[in-house]
Amino acid sequence: MTDYNAIARNNLDEIMRELAEYTRLGEEIAATVDSLKDILKKHMEENGLDVLTGTEHKATYKAVSSSRVDTTALKKELPDIAAKFTRTTSSKRFTFI
């Protein structure tokens, strides 16, 4: 059985170097994806299209409506009710710089 904790302890710098490299690559890929999406969205807007169909893929770019509770206004206007329905949660956050 592989002891991943022992491997990690012995290779922390290498693991962090690799994580940094993959993080950088992921950011580059995300930027490329966003750029390609922007090109398609601009084409769709300029041509008044909600749907764009290619030979293998389809893109849609439509307005979407959603409703959310304005918690700031609720806390101001009805603080007792806001407090009654407020739930506190906790989680762990991993950051890597």
Image (cartoon, grey):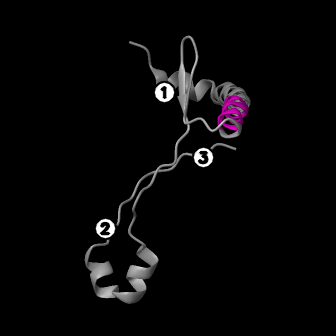
Residue 37 in the magenta stretch? The answer is yes
CA separation, marks 2 and 1?
Answer: 35 Å
* Residue at x 45% of width, y 51% of height: 92
Q: Which circle's residue, 2 or 1, is located before the other in the chain?
A: 1
Residue 66 in the magenta stretch? The answer is no
* Front position in the image: 96 or 72: 72
Instruction: Specify the amino acid type for callout 3.
Output: Thr
The local secondary structure at tag 3 comes to: loop
Instruction: Specify the amino acid type for callout 2.
Output: Arg
CA separation, marks 2 and 3?
Answer: 25 Å
Instruction: Specify the amino acid type for callout 1.
Output: Asn
Give the residue number, with chain letter if any, for mark 3: 95
Residue 33, located in which quarter of the rendered image? top right
Magenta region, residue range: 33-44
Residue 87, located in which quarter of the rendered image? bottom left
Q: Which circle's residue, 2 or 3, is located before the other in the chain?
A: 2
Give the residue number, with chain letter if any, for mark 2: 87
* Residue at x 42% of width, y 87% of height: 76
Count of marks overlaid on the render: 3
Give the residue number, with chain letter if any, for mark 1: 5
Tell me if mark 3 has few (under 14), some (14-19) or many (20+) residues whose alpha carbon lies within 10 angstroms of its own. few
Nearest to the eye among marks 2 and 3: give it.
Answer: 2
Position of 87 with respect to 56 (left or right) is left
Q: Are marks 2 and 3 in contact (CB under 8 Å)?
A: no
Helix, strand or loop: magenta stretch: helix
Position of 20 with respect to 74 (left or right) is right
Q: Which circle's residue, 1 or 3, is located before the other in the chain?
A: 1
